[in-house]
Every structure is written in structure tokens, then in C-alpha cells.
Image: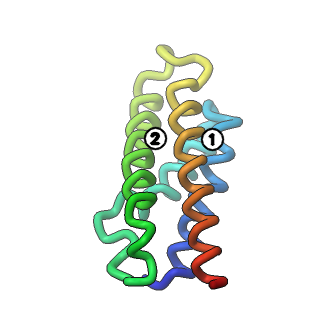
């Protein structure tokens, strides 16, 4: 997987995550985020590109937070009444958004260097 593909995946996840921070109770927003995060939790992501080796820690953080958010989405869909404001999704999505923003910025910087 080349760096521009990785950057595109991270950017899409960042947009979906941002929407979930502001509208965590919207089913379509949660579904989009769930699908956008799928590549991030894949063990094959981001691949073995040596250009991205310095971002290993950020990829690990993104993978962990993405997994947490996906789990919260699954639990929210099955247990909606326990979290009427969507906070179980909003808070970890906000933390994931921070990591994704840093990762996208670093990927862009690496591409431009």
C-alpha cells in the first residue's frame, strides 16, 4: 500500500469520525464510520512500506482507538437506551479524531518532503 493510498484511507476515516463526534446518535453516521474504520483495524494496514516506518506508533494508536470506536458503535446499536446522548461513541471518536488528524498531517508532510 503506497503512502497516498494510506493518506486517502486516513482522510476518509477522519471525515467520518468528525461527523460521529457531532452526530453520534445518527445511524447513517455511525454506519459510515464503522465502514471507514474497517481498513484501519486490519492487521495488513498500512503494509510494510519503509517510508511509513516512522509512523508505526501513530498507526498503532489509530488501530486501537478505531477498534474501541467500532466496539462502541456495535454496543450502541444493540443497547441504545443505556446511552441516550451517544456519549459512548462521541468521546472515543473525539480521541480517535485527534490521532487521525495527526496521522494525516504526518502522511502529508512525508509525501511533500
The percent position of residue 85, horizontal first and vertical second, equals 62, 20
Which of the numbered marks, if any, corresponds to residue 73? none
Residue 20 position (above or below residue 112): above
Query: Which of the two labelled residues, at mark 2 and mark 1, occupies the earlier sequence position?
Result: 1
Q: Are the residues tagged 2 and 1 within 8 Å (C-beta)?
A: yes
Please tell me whether mark 2 sits on a helix, a strand or a loop: helix
How would you rate the neighbour count of disc 1 (Cα within 10 Å): few for under 14, some for 14-19, many for 20 or more?
many
Tell me the quarter of the picture where residue 100 sits.
bottom right
Looking at this view, is 47 or 26 the one in front?
A: 47
Which of the numbered marks, if any, corresponds to residue 20? 1
The residue where tag 2 is placed is 69
The mark total stands at 2
Q: How far apart, in angstroms, are the residues tagged by discs 2 and 1? A: 10 Å
Looking at this view, is 92 or 74 the one in front?
A: 92
Please tell me whether mark 1 sits on a helix, a strand or a loop: helix
Seen at 40% across and 30% down, the residue is 75
Residue 80 position (above or below residue 50): above
The percent position of residue 25, horizontal first and vertical second, equals 62, 30
Amino acid at each position: 500500500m503506497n503512502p497516498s493510498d494510506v493518506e486517502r484511507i486516513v482522510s476518509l476515516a477522519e471525515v467520518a469520525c468528525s461527523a460521529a463526534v457531532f452526530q453520534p446518535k445518527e445511524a447513517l453516521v455511525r454506519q459510515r464510520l464503522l465502514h471507514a474504520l474497517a481498513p484501519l483495524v486490519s492487521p495488513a494496514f498500512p503494509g510494510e512500506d519503509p517510508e511509513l516506518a516512522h509512523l508505526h506508533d501513530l498507526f498503532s494508536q489509530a488501530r486501537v482507538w478505531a477498534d474501541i470506536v467500532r466496539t462502541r458503535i456495535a454496543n450502541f446499536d444493540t443497547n441504545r437506551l443505556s446511552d441516550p446522548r451517544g456519549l459512548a461513541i462521541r468521546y472515543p471518536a473525539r480521541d480517535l479524531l485527534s490521532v487521525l488528524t495527526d496521522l494525516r498531517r504526518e502522511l502529508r508532510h512525508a509525501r511533500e518532503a
